[in-house]
Amino acid sequence: MSEREPLGVQITAREIYDELRDMRGEVRTMAQHLDTDKTAIADHEARIRAIERWKYSIPAAVLMGIASVAVEVARATGGK
């Protein structure tokens, strides 16, 4: 071992370059997965929002239905 290589290991510029290229490919793959995940999350959010709108519109529909039935019952029994 020399003073330039105190641990007996030499990493060349080519090895660093190759590792950097591999990492770039991995980052691209992760970016593609991230885009796919973002699309899936947006889809899930839209579905959840649609369910929430449906869920909160049911009480209003039930109240309108009850009111309609009450009006019809009142008409049928002769009340005004």
Image (cartoon, grey):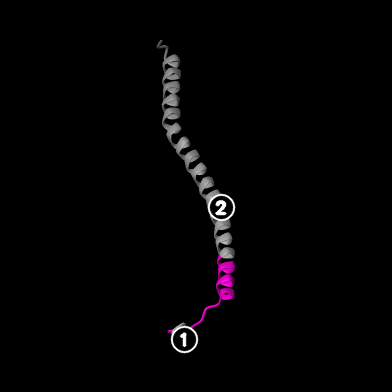
Vertical order, 14 against 60 (above or below)? below
Where residue 62 sits in the image (x, y, percent)? 43, 29
Residue extending farthest bottom? 1
32 and 16: which is toward the camera: 16
Give the quadrant of residue 75: top left
Residue at the spot of label 1 = 8
Residue at the spot of label 2 = 35
The residue located at (59%, 64%) in the rendering is 25
In magenta, the rendered stretch is 5-23
Vertical order, 27 against 6 (above or below)? above
Q: Which element type, helix, strand or loop, lies under badge 1?
A: loop
The residue located at (59%, 72%) in the rendering is 18
Give the quadrant of residue 60: top left
Vertical order, 50 against 37 (above or below)? above
Instruction: Inspect the image, locate mark 1, and give the three-letter code of the amino acid beneath it.
Output: Gly
Q: Of discs 2 and 1, which sits in the foreground?
A: 1
Instruction: Inspect the image, locate mark 2, and give the three-letter code of the amino acid beneath it.
Output: Asp
Q: Which element type, helix, strand or loop, lies under badge 2?
A: helix
The residue located at (45%, 28%) in the rendering is 61
